[in-house]
Image: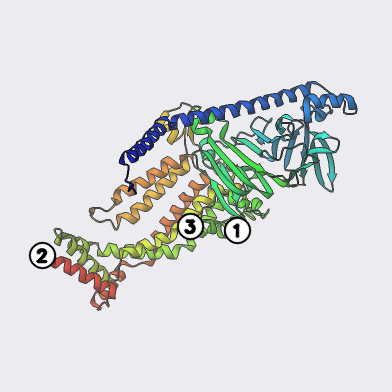
Amino acid sequence: MEEKKFDFNSIIGFVLIFVIMGVMLYMNRKTPEEIAEEEAKQEQIKAAEQSTITEKTSNFVEESNAVAVDPKDSLAMAAAKSQLGVVAYSAGLPSAKDNLTTIENDVLRLKINNKGGYIEEALLKQFKTYDSIPVYLIKDGKNASFNINFGTTDNRILNTKDLFFEPTVSENSENTVLSMKWKVSPSEFLEYRYEIKPNDYMVDFTIRSQGLQQTINSGQNISLDWKLQAIRQAKSASYENRYTDIHYEYEGGDKDSYTGQGEFDEETEEEVSWIGYKQHFFTSILLTDTPFKTATFTSTNVVSKSELPDKDITVTKEFTSSMQLALQGGELNYNMDWYYGPVDYKTLNAYDRNLDEIVPLGWGIFGWINKYLFIPLFGFLSSFIGSYGLIIILMTVLIKLVLSPVQYKQYVSQAKMKILKPEINEISEKYKDNAMKKQQETMALYSKAGASPMSGCLPSLMQIPVFYALFSFFPSAFDLRQKSFLWAEDLSSYDTIFEWSTNIPVISSIYGNHISLFPILASIAIFIYMTMTTGQTMQTQQPGMPNMKFIMYLSPLMMLIFFNNYASGLSLYYFISNLITIGIMLVIKNFIIDDDKIHAKIQENKKKPKKQGKFQKKMKELMEQAEQQKAKK
């Protein structure tokens, strides 16, 4: 029998075939650019199809507006439905007009248009803008829109903003109820229901459908789109814009928010239970008992894009939200609320929906200090004092008195450092060429004298939470809005002693077109305070250490420039606070602290043997070893 042998030529042939096939596949593969081009073409085709459907739907709506069909005429209705689809019935109702229905209470007035069924005007009755114009959060329907976008079973895309709703006003005890229905038939409709209560900024709002299982295409997304341009309400558009942002609550109570003057293109969150378009002192909030599965937000900073001077800006930011709605048994059913009102902590907190998170009181401990100390204190003082300027002064006095023991410890530490200054200078001169030995001897002096530079810093650090909490509190205090004091017309805005109309590019953008007096007074007080505290302990500038003389001049300068556009109530606080601090320091220095006694105590401490802890011993050993190694080199 002939033995089989490997046919190497066949093997090589097969290998070559596979190689050639691989090369051909590789050469004929689609490049990423070609793939992207094909995907773009498919998207264009889909967009064109959608555009055609939308255009046809828009034409149907326009035709339905032009053709009034009597709903009682069954033959005419049948013919209209074959042409216009589900919009035919509502087009034949008398309500198919741009008519407005007004509902109001003592604090709020809302006007709802038949077209779209949405609020076209939201007026807060008890407030005025900086130039005495009524406060409108929505005006003439030009700065806001509210729309539900959904597909129908007859292959049309409808937007509720284009549809006509039939209004019905009724009373529910003391409440006024407005039902807006877009009708497909007498018993089939989409309803927006508004219920306004006496003396309340919160309006009950319901979105529900009835009998639309065969009308709404459940296979397509249903989106709720809410847009708003924030109308300028304050004297300074740039300052108001700083506190204008989106807030929302999501995932069962965790809060998140977008803040600042910047902008973002898109952010998406899940399980969103309320959305707030917040301005400095007023806000529009949409709440829902059934959280939106997903919500996408955008924010556009109009002020930063505007080339107009501050005084001519009418809109600060533009907000959009797009939420996905879910059908329940083929129907829409969402219990919601609208809040149109002030950004006032007490008012928002009373609703027990975490709406007070909109008020920027600071994060963590700073927010706690404001919520549980300063807000109650401010409310208590305002219950029997009519002048809010005096309330700020009295509040500042009380805070400084409470912190005076801390101030005392800080000054005692500064006094010790002042007394030790000649000896420290002597050590610095003696070991000027040996930094490690100089540090070692300086620390030994501090230890013997019972003094420490850190003992002066710790009291200052303890005051930082209070300082920052008040920095957040005063600009957010709604009660200060349009309250005057001395030359300041509005404690929630900047005070003015001189202004000019000429726009100076750099100066106007940073400093403004005016001069405020309270920041000047606060800057002078800060400079005096820093001269008293820094001057008495200032030592020769050490390498790598901050220049204290530079800081002494920088802080008042920063206050003078950047606080020129801040709320005058905040500058008043800093002015009074530093005046009181200066007074406390003078009292402590002249009537409480005796430098001779402190000096004697330091000398006595030097004679006592100091017990060193393990850490101090270890540090001393390490420094001595380092010194020995340096000496060997």
Report which residue position mark 3 lands on: 466
> Seen in the image, is 53 located left or right of residue 67?
left
Q: Do residues under tags 2 and 3 come within 8 Å of each other at their CB atoms?
A: no
Nearer the observer, 625 or 613:
625
Residue 281 visible in the current orientation: no
* Front tag of 2 and 3: 2
Any mark on residue 376, and which? 1
Q: Name the residue located 63 percent from the left edge and 27 percent from the top edge.
A: 49
* Front tag of 2 and 1: 2
> Seen in the image, is 279 located left or right of residue 218?
left
Q: Secondary structure at mark 1?
A: helix
Q: Crowding near pointer 3: few (<14 within 10 Å), some, many (20+)?
A: some
Would you place residue 306 above or below residue 277 in this image? above
Nearer the observer, 509 or 221:
221
Q: Do residues under tags 3 and 1 come within 8 Å of each other at their CB atoms?
A: no
What is the x, y in percent for residue 37? 49, 28
Amino acid under disc 1: Pro
Report which quarter residue 558 is drawn in: top left
Report which quarter residue 505 is drawn in: top left
> Seen in the image, is 534 located left or right of residue 177?
left
| First in residue order: circle 2 vs circle 1 | 1
| First in residue order: circle 2 vs circle 3 | 3
What's the distance in space between the residues labelled 2 and 3, CA to CA?
A: 49 Å
What is the x, y in percent for residue 467? 46, 55
Report which residue position mark 2 lands on: 631
Q: Crowding near pointer 1: few (<14 within 10 Å), some, many (20+)?
A: few
What is the x, y in percent for residue 148? 69, 36
Q: Secondary structure at mark 3?
A: helix
Which image quadrant: the C terminus?
bottom left
Any mark on residue 511, and which? none
